[in-house]
Image (tube, grey):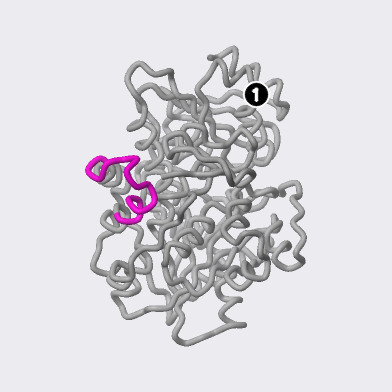
């Protein structure tokens, strides 16, 4: 697999190099030189395959010979060992549940696959791998569990102070071993900026072998395509052949993976980018002006991103052709009040408890269908996190009905360990150097 930088299309690096470097020195993002189109026989018979079988076929076509088939199969069976079911709520309205992994969030797909790929590529005697990751909520927990105990790796998780839920914070700060947490007095965008700057700092690069576990890493993006193909496979089994996906969107890795799957031949009619008031992309799709802005804290905290990193990948997929992009992607944004109204509506009408991110995706799907309803097209909204992660969001009548898994109950018995820092790069750099 050959990859190039979105800022320099003539760049060529291997998959292994892209995985370990995460981000090119020119501060672009890595993209595949060739995006293979899967054969029609496979696509039309997706319903005959299991999730691991689908994942292996998709990964082999993208990664090629960089990881031999038997080794890749083992990585996938170890990483993707949980389900991602599609549940029907009503005619032409389905929910894709992506929170059945160990951290109870969709990020398990990317984090577990990436950690095992990195472990596979690490050779004995090599310098320790330092993984830096910024999180607005769920990424950190998934990465922590994905890398926990992986030999010769150390993970540093940066999260914004007071802007993740209590359970999310416990998932970040109670692991110990090779996982450490840094609480930043700022926003997710500040955390993300610190990680990005670390990769281009000469002194840090010389001392550490740095890589990222954020969705800027191509090894996070690839496995997220798996559940789009698998969702379509489940719909084929019940006779559905046309589908749109409504995707809760923050850093835009999730919908970016969906669009990559579409480029590989998955017959998706349309994508909906559903955001909270951090609406940089919906505004761009409406006005044609891309204007990043400071992020605003909301109930859907994992989507509080004002300058989404993965947007450059999506723009690259469409070669900057805005009108073509707008035919495939529609953006919607909602405030906290609308989010709470959606949560209540979903519970009252479907007896289904949606996390705030999921509720926004449902609302966007509902609004799109009201304007564009077609009887032969099914709408699927992505449910990205277990509702137990957001106990303070729900009214008491709904909160009492949330099933809390045992692993979450166990978290409350553990002690938080985190270092507090400001948002200046000098302080973060000093912390890394002193604790190397």
- Determine whether 256 is above or below 322 in the image: above
Q: Which stretch appears magenta?
A: 57-71
**Farthest residue toward the bottom?**
375
| Residue 197 placement: quadrant | top right
In front of the other: 254 or 277: 254
Name the side, left or right, on which 24 lies relative to 41.
right
Q: Secondary structure at mark 1?
A: loop
Q: Image point 35% across, 36% down: which residue?
A: 116
User: x, y (%) of residue 198?
Assistant: 62, 27
Q: Residues within 10 Å of mark 1 (few under 14, many from 20)?
A: few
Q: Image point 45% across, 56% down: which residue?
A: 35
Q: Image point 59% across, 50% down: which residue?
A: 310
Is the stretch drawn in magenta largely helix, strand or loop? helix
- Determine whether 370 is above or below 395 in the image: below
Name the side, left or right, on which 20 lies relative to 237.
right
In front of the other: 392 or 136: 136
Residue 75 lies in magenta, yes or no? no
Name the side, left or right, on which 414 lies relative to 363.
left
User: x, y (%) of residue 122?
Assistant: 36, 27
Name the side, left or right, on which 431 lies relative to 58.
right
Q: Quadrant of the N terminus?
A: top left
User: x, y (%) of residue 257?
Assistant: 48, 56
Residue at which label 1 appears: 201
In front of the other: 146 or 33: 33
């Amino acid at each position: 697999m050959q990859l190039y930088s979105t800022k320099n299309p003539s760049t060529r690096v291997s998959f292994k190099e892209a995985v370990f470097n995460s981000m090119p020195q020119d501060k672009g993002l890595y993209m595949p030189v060739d995006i293979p189109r899967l054969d029609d026989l496979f696509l039309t018979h997706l319903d005959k395959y299991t999730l691991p079988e689908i994942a292996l076929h998709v990964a082999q076509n993208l990664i090629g010979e960089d990881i031999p088939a038997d080794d890749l199969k083992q990585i996938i069976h170890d990483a993707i060992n949980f389900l991602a079911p599609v549940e029907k709520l009503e005619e032409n309205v389905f929910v894709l549940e992506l929170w059945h992994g160990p951290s109870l969030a969709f990020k398990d797909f990317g984090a577990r696959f990436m950690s095992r790929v990195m472990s596979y590529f690490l050779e004995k005697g090599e310098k320790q791998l330092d993984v830096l990751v910024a999180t607005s909520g769920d990424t950190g927990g998934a990465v922590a569990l994905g890398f926990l105990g992986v030999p010769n790796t150390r993970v540093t998780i940066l999260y914004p102070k007071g802007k993740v839920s209590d359970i999310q914070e416990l998932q970040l700060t109670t692991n110990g071993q090779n996982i450490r947490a840094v609480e930043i007095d700022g926003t997710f965008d500040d955390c993300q900026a610190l990680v990005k700057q670390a990769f281009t700092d000469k002194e840090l690069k010389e001392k550490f072998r740095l890589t990222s576990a954020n969705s800027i890493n191509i090894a996070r993006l690839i496995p997220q395509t798996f559940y789009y193909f698998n969702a379509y496979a489940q719909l084929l089994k019940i006779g559905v052949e046309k589908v749109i996906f409504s995707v809760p969107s923050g850093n835009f890795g999730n919908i970016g993976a969906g669009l990559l799957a579409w480029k590989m031949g998955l017959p998706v009619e349309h994508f909906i980018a559903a955001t909270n008031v951090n609406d940089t992309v919906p505004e761009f799709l409406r006005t044609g002006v891309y204007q990043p802005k400071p992020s605003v804290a909301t109930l859907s905290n994992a989507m509080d991103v004002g300058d989404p990193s993965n947007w450059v990948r999506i723009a690259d997929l469409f070669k900057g052709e805005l009108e073509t992009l707008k035919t495939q992607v529609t953006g919607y944004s909602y405030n906290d009040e609308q989010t709470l109204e959606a949560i209540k509506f979903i519970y009252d009408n479907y007896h289904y408890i949606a996390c705030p991110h999921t509720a926004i995706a449902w609302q966007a799907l509902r609004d799109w269908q009201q304007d564009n309803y077609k009887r032969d097209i099914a709408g699927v909204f992505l449910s990205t996190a277990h509702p137990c992660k957001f106990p303070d969001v729900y009214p008491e009548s709904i909160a009492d009905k949330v099933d809390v898994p045992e692993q979450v109950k166990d978290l409350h018995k553990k002690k938080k360990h985190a270092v507090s820092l400001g948002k200046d790069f000098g302080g973060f750099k000093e912390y890394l150097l002193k604790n190397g």
